Amino acid sequence: MNSAIFPDNLKELSFALRQGKLPLQDYLIQTLADIEKKEPVLCALEPEENRQERLLKQAEELLSRFSQPELRPPLFGVLIGVKDLFNVDGLPTRAGSKLPPEVFSGKEAEIVTRLKNLGALILGKTACTEFAYFQPAKTKNPCNPNHTPGGSSSGSAAAVAAGYCLLALGTQTIGSIIRPASYCGVTGLKPSYGLFSLQGVFPFSQTVDHLGFITKQVADLAFLLPLLHLSVSTKITDRPVLGAVNGSYLQQADSSVQENYCSALDKLQKKGYKIVTCDPFGDINSINASHNALIAAEFSLNHKSLYERYQELYSDSSKELYARGLQISSAELENLRQQTIILREKIINLMQEQKIDLWITPSTTTTAPAGLKSTGSPLMSLPWTNCGLPALTIPNGLDANGLPFGLQFVASYNEDLPLVRMVQRIVNTQEIET
């Protein structure tokens, strides 16, 4: 059995595993053999001795516990990648850093336990940038290993794109889910701020840290979110009014990205979608500066005791961020925190005034840059992260070098499942080139 013929969506894979139509041991052995071939190049996972032995033992325990297919939980045996910021029982956490794993030890992340209770098996820790900031991991982009996969959820995006798993956990503090998912040609969801608990996840900046998911396709998210007891809070619109962006925010994207974006808008308009074009942000440079100051200040607070003990183990970029954060006073920090709420209210009010159901923007400023020294620009994600609205990226064709473009959709606060289902409809009717 070849892993290439396994179901390529979460719902079908989980059904096949639950029913025994895909034997769990075969799924694990074939998937791990595929990973063994690809991983020396891609470096998406943190190294783990005896990974196969651990997983086969856990599979035996699952099969023993749930011997009857009709009693098996919905994610029975499904492999999931977990970003190396999340505590997982039995696996060390290093947060992509050189610090000893003992300093990150603690109770297993709540979301990991929830997924395990749904029957999932943890494939392993996925590589991430140091402390989820800018210092890159060794991970390469499966679309082209000479290009960055993005960050900070580098390994999670690469693992899904390479077929290691159909679901991986990530976090986003600027653009760390949307950007790598877009660069790697997969789907990423940054949920509404606070929707999912970050208990057991090493913090970067609590005011804007988001827990999220990277999957192969939107349908995977539509299957997953109800399992996590996420219900629809408002009526889903069959043909949502789309808010297109202009102004200084859009001007941050390069010409090829803007052309791809305009082409997508043109196709949607011809399909009968109403598109309202406006500038939701005004001076984007001011928002960028405020966000960067906020995360620097909270990074410094979170790292104070660690930095005092392990300063020599921090990269230059993390040292610079720490020093920058120390310059921000408590009063300034409180004002920066309030600005996130003000921006959220401004965007929601604009959506109500213009009757916009979803914003649509480019996912990134460029396609994946060449080389591994940088993880690329997060600026297309930054204001949406700052205001805490849910954002979803899907692929939208390829550039001249065969690298994926992405489209980002954003909904109102706590409208995460409507966001997923409205975008799923757009994708299913082939109104976007995925």
Image: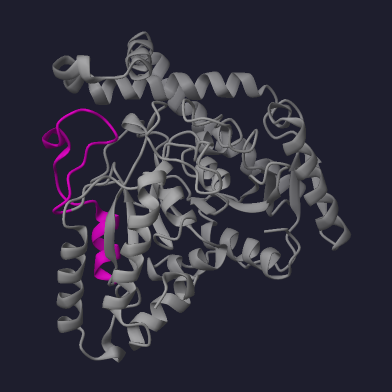
Residue pushed farthest left?
A: 102
Magenta residues span 89-118
Instruction: Name the residue: 46% across, 39% down.
Output: 176
Residue pushed farthest top?
A: 327
Q: Nearer the viewer, residue 425 or 330?
A: 425
Instruction: Name the residue: 16% across, 82% down.
Output: 65
Q: Is 228 included in the stretch rendered in magenta?
A: no
Instruction: Tell me if 309 is positioned left or right of 423 in this view.
Output: left
- Residue 97, above or below 35: above
Q: Position of residue 314 (x, y in %)?
A: 27, 19
Q: Quadrant location of the C terminus?
A: bottom right
- Residue 215, above or below 304: below
Q: Which of the 4 image quarters holds residue 32?
A: bottom left
- Residue 246, can we see it? no
- Residue 46, can we see it? yes
Q: Position of residue 415 (x, y in %)?
A: 55, 57
Q: Nearer the viewer, residue 195 or 106?
A: 106
Q: Quadrant location of the N terminus?
A: bottom left
The figure's colour scheme reads one colour
Instruction: Tell me if 199 is positioned left or right of 65 in this view.
Output: right
